Image (spheres, helix red, strand yellow):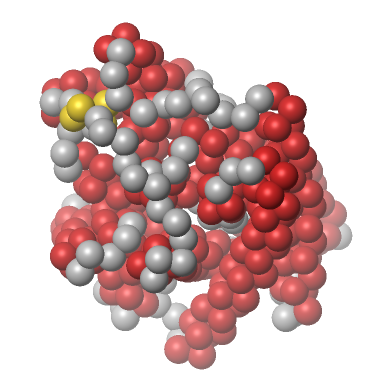
Amino acid sequence: MSIILRTCLIGAVGGGLAHWAGFPSDWLLGAMLLVALAAMAGVEMRMPKSLLPVIQATLGVAVGLRLDLNIPGPAALLFSVAGLLLCLGTQIPLTQWLLQRLGWSRQESMLAASPGALSVMAALATDLDNPLRVILSQTVRVIMLVSLVGLAMALEWVPVAAMPDSTGLSVPATGLLILAAWCLGRLGARLPASYILSGVLSAGGYAAWQGEPLVPAAGVIPVGMVLLGALVGSRLRPLPAREMGYLLLVGVLITLSSSLMALVWAAAVAWWLEVPLFQVWLAYAPGAVEAMIYLALVTGLEPSWVIFHHVLRILLLSASAAWLIRRAEAGRD
């Protein structure tokens, strides 16, 4: 318990410092970086995985409270989904090829190349002889993506829309919505992103009943993001300096290559549909769904668009999980 409390405290300090400095995506990025640095320095960091459903439910509620169904029609949405599929069809082979050129096995490169499904791929990696490579590369990719987006926002390279005026819920009302989302999510726990979807549905229904835009109680999202940042950052483990440097460089390489590929396809889709490029890129970006949804929330863009594409990607990657396992086992023979 003392290790978990220490991890939370370090995450809170990191998030608080980033917030004080006025850095975009402050609570998430600050907590993620400080906990990761502490972990790499040899300080034991640990967060219970059972926190992830609560964090997902909280994010789902935040999206649901400001759910906007004014998204492109079926034809435009189908065009964007086609762009996502083409993006995946180029991201994964390119990253896999790069990793194999660096000497990674076929199984390792397959799992590390899959974008935006950290939990699924980390679980599959436990069957490998050296799962740490896959887990670290996926973790570094999330940290780097959040850092890059935060830097782009700070330098005003990305146009940021204003947040809509909304009424803040009380702490009890927010807590009840999160609890309802968590309970609904447990009922469909076998479905990918069930807690996020249940949060969107329960909070969206409540906001529609109230008839006005709403936001969670003050402090709820920052606390959730500190916990998420600590959870991601604590995945890193101290390694010999040379090996850690190597894995960090690999993480940077696959992040840049897959992010650039996402940018290419996002630019084509955004130009055709006449929607903000950053919004489409967030939907295609190879990052964890929780982090990408939060970034959509703090930019004031349409998080419903982002959540749809990321959930679809998780469904596709999860559906192929059995195939990945069979292919990995065949590679051992």
- Is residue 210 something that shows in the picture? yes
Q: Residue furthest bottom?
A: 242
Q: Position of residue 236 (x, y in %)?
A: 42, 68
Q: Position of residue 1 (x, y in %)?
A: 19, 53
Picture mark count: 0
Q: Which residue is found at the position 18% from the left and 29% from the top? A: 168
Q: Position of residue 9 (x, y in %)?
A: 16, 60
- Residue 73 to residue 193: above or below: above
Quarter residue 129 falls in = bottom right
- Residue 44 to residue 226: above or below: below
Q: Position of residue 317 (x, y in %)?
A: 68, 43
Q: Which residue is found at the position 13% from the left and 26% from the top? A: 170
Horizontal relation, residue 232 to residue 105: left or right:
left
Q: Which residue is found at the position 45% from the left and 89% from the top? A: 241
- Residue 168 to residue 116: above or below: above
Is residue 295 or residue 192 the one in the foreground?
295
